[in-house]
Amino acid sequence: MKHGGRFVRSQKMTIVNGILAIVLILVILQLWLLVATTNAYLGDETGFLVPAALASALCLALILGLIRYLYGLDR
C-alpha cells in the first residue's frame, strides 16, 4: 500500500520485475528485427528496412521511457 504517496519496497520490486520483463521482451524483439532485417538485406529485399528501423526505434523509445519511469520511482 502507498504510504504518503510513495510505494513500499515490495510494491517497488513488483513494478521493477514487471518492467524488467517488458524490457527483456522488447530487447528480444529488437534482436529478432536485426536478424530478420539483415537476412532480408543480404537477400536483396530492401522493402521493409525503413519500417523495421522505425519499429526498432519505437522499441528503444519504450525502453528509455520505462527506464526513466524507474528513476522517477526512486524519488
Image (cartoon, grey):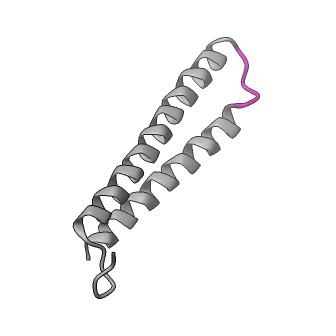
Q: Is residue 21 above or below residue 73?
A: above
Between residues 53 and 32, which one lies in front from this camera angle?
32
- The outermost residue toward the bottom is 4
Direction right: furthest residue: 47
6 vs 36: above or below: below
**Residue 5 appears left or right of 57:** left
Residue 59, compared with residue 30, is above or below; it is below
Where residue 55 sits, quadrant-wise, is: top right
User: Measuring 63% from the left and 45% from the top, which residue is drawn there?
Assistant: 54
Q: Overall secondary structure of the magenta stretch?
A: loop
Q: Position of residue 29 (x, y in %)?
A: 53, 34
Nearest the eye: 23 or 46: 23
- Point 45% across, 52% down: residue: 63
Q: Which residues are magenta?
A: 44-48
Q: Residue at x 54, y 26 (%)?
A: 32
Q: Residue furthest top?
A: 43
Residue 61 coordinates in the image, percent (x, y): 51, 55
Q: Residue at x 67, y 32 (%)?
A: 49
**Is residue 71 shown in magenta?**
no
Q: Give the side of residue 35 with respect to residue 66, left or right.
A: right
Instruction: Where is residue 5? Give x, y as percent.
Output: 33, 85
Foreground of the two, 57 or 27: 27
